[in-house]
Amino acid sequence: MILNKGEGKKDLIFTDACKRQIQHACMLVETKFEAVRSGNVVVQDLQYINDHLETFVESIAILKKNENVGKEEVRKTVKLRLKEVEEFTQQQGQMKHFVSLCQHASGTYLSQIVYIIRYF
């Protein structure tokens, strides 16, 4: 980036390399938002986005202004995905506990458990 101070003006002039890096960063942010929006986001990426939520929201609002993507929509989408991860984690813990209990059950007892789960 070069600061041009000709004739009392202060303009920023970006080098080609800088422009490419900015374009790459913008594409990455847009790609991450689409992953969040579709529900195909990596959990670590979602946590990172949440840690930097306001910067992410502002960036998406600028990048997607032609598509009328509002800041509140971005916030709600990220929060929804976080809630889904939280619920999945909770269910995963419950399933681990259930499987652990079932490992100690005999065949007859286990078939009764399966019957109860299916029909009740």
Image (spheres, rainbow, N blue to C red):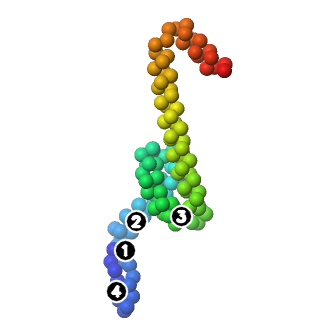
Rendering quarter of residue 74: bottom right
Q: Of the residues under marks 2 and 4, which one precedes in the sequence?
A: 4
Residue shown at the point (38%, 78%) measured from the top left: 12
How many numbered badges does the structure rendering display?
4
Q: Nearer the viewer, mark 3 or mark 1?
A: 3
Q: Of the residues under marks 2 and 3, which one precedes in the sequence?
A: 2
Residue 22, label in figure: 2
Write down the residue under mark 4.
Answer: 5
Residue shown at the point (50%, 8%) measured from the top left: 106
Write down the residue under mark 3.
Answer: 61
Write down the residue under mark 1.
Answer: 14
Q: Of the residues under marks 3 and 4, which one precedes in the sequence?
A: 4
Query: x, y (%) of residue 34?
Result: 52, 52
Q: Nearer the viewer, mark 4 or mark 1?
A: 4
Residue 56, above or below 39 = below
SS state under label 3: helix
Give yes or no for contact between labels 2 and 1 (Cβ–Cβ under 8 Å): yes
Spatial CA distance of label 2 from label 4 is 23 Å
Quadrant that contains the N terminus: bottom left
In this rendering, position of residue 79 left or right of residue 120: left
